């Protein structure tokens, strides 16, 4: 596994963790604001506009506590309506459980569980008024209704990393194919560079076309040997459709002109057979 790949995976994991933490923090703060408003409306129902809703506490993940400065009465019907309205407004989960507890004994005096599908909700004794006393509410959100952007960010980062890796892999492959090497073949007074499509004579560069280069490479691989016309045409023109026999002769003629300055090099036509690169 490459160091670059390990680095990208590390960045991906850290980014997912940071995104997840950010989402959880945003949910917590939004829940606290909404729950504080629930407490405020319950006090107003009690004709109390002066006492305070104490700071909302997060007890555990997705579980919160609302407490009050003074005693109050709690009407379950009103509690249900106030909570439902505020949670919908804040786009909080529709599945939650609310417990009303007595401050003195920390006992549950009323509770209900709301579901997105209300026929599955558990709501006992809605009409029974809880007399004035010191109460606090514990609210447990049972699931997150909102789509967690952490998932989408994670997928985006994963696609991004895969794309980067594919890009560098392709670039590396292209570089390995395109970058010429310094390998050369001595050919009389010339140096032949097959990867760069050129001949060099006394620091003078003689460019070769692709076909000229391929043809000369075949000759230099089998010097002083006869290579049949059919073999030459097959290896050089086999992927280009119809082959015209005179194309080979034309390229041989071009090579002869580019090699003419060295009399020790000849491309000889073996009549009816093929060609031979003769090197003295």
Image (cartoon, grey):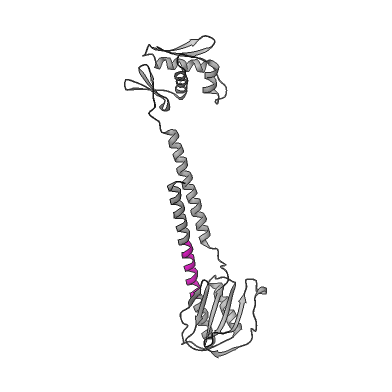
In the rendered view, tell whether residue 129 sits above or below residue 116: below
Q: Nearer the viewer, residue 183 or 39?
A: 183
The residue sitting at the bottom extreme is: 132
In depth, the one of 260 and 81 nearer the eye is 260
Q: Quadrant of residue 105?
A: bottom right
Q: 95 or 251: nearer the eye?
A: 95
Is 141 left, or right, of 2 in this rendering?
right
Q: Is residue 91 above or below residue 133?
A: above
**Residue 228 left/right relative to 175:** right
Q: Residue at x 36, y 19 (%)?
A: 190
Q: Position of residue 277 (x, y in %)?
A: 45, 14
Q: Is residue 29 magenta?
A: yes
Residue at the limit of the structure toward the top, as seen here: 271
Q: Which residue, as the protein is rendered here, is positioned at the far front?
A: 1
Prevailing secondary structure of the magenta residues: helix
Q: Quadrant of the C terminus?
A: top left
Q: Is residue 73 magenta?
A: no
Position above or below: 61 against 216: below
Say above or below: 243 vs 71: above
Q: Position of residue 121 (x, y in %)?
A: 65, 75
Q: Position of residue 135 (x, y in %)?
A: 53, 86
Residue projecting furthest to the right? 119
Residue at image position (60%, 83%) is 76
Residue nearest the observer in this picture, 18 or 89: 18
Residues shaded magenta: 19-33
Location of residue 68 in the rendering, given as x and y in whole percent from the top left corner: 49, 84
* Residue 94 occupies quadrant: bottom right
Q: How many marks?
A: 0
């Amino acid at each position: 596994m490459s160091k670059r790949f390990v680095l990208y995976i590390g960045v991906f994991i850290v980014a997912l963790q940071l995104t997840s933490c950010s989402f959880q923090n945003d949910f917590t703060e939004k829940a606290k604001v909404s729950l504080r408003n629930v407490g405020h409306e319950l006090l107003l129902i009690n004709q109390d506009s002066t006492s305070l809703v104490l700071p909302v506490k997060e007890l555990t993940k997705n579980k919160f506590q609302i407490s009050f400065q003074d005693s109050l009465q709690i009407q379950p019907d009103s509690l249900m309506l106030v909570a439902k309205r505020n949670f919908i407004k804040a786009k909080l989960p529709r599945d939650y459980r609310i417990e009303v507890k007595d401050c003195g004994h920390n006992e549950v005096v009323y509770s209900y569980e709301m579901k997105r599908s209300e026929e599955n909700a558990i709501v006992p004794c809605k009409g029974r008024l809880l007399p004035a006393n010191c109460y606090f509410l514990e609210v447990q959100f049972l699931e997150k209704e909102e789509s967690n952007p952490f998932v989408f960010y994670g997928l985006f980062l994963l696609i991004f990393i895969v794309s980067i890796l594919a890009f560098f892999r392709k670039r590396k492959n292209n570089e390995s194919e395109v970058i010429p090497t310094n390998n050369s073949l001595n050919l009389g007074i010339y140096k032949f560079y097959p990867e760069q499509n050129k001949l060099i004579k006394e620091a003078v560069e003689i460019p070769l076309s692709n076909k000229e280069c391929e043809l000369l490479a075949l000759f230099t691989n089998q010097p002083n040997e006869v290579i049949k016309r059919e073999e030459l045409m097959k290896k050089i023109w086999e992927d280009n459709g119809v082959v015209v026999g005179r194309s080979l002769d034309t390229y041989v003629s071009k090579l002869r002109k580019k090699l003419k300055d060295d009399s020790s090099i000849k491309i000889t036509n073996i009549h009816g057979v093929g060609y031979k690169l003769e090197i003295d």
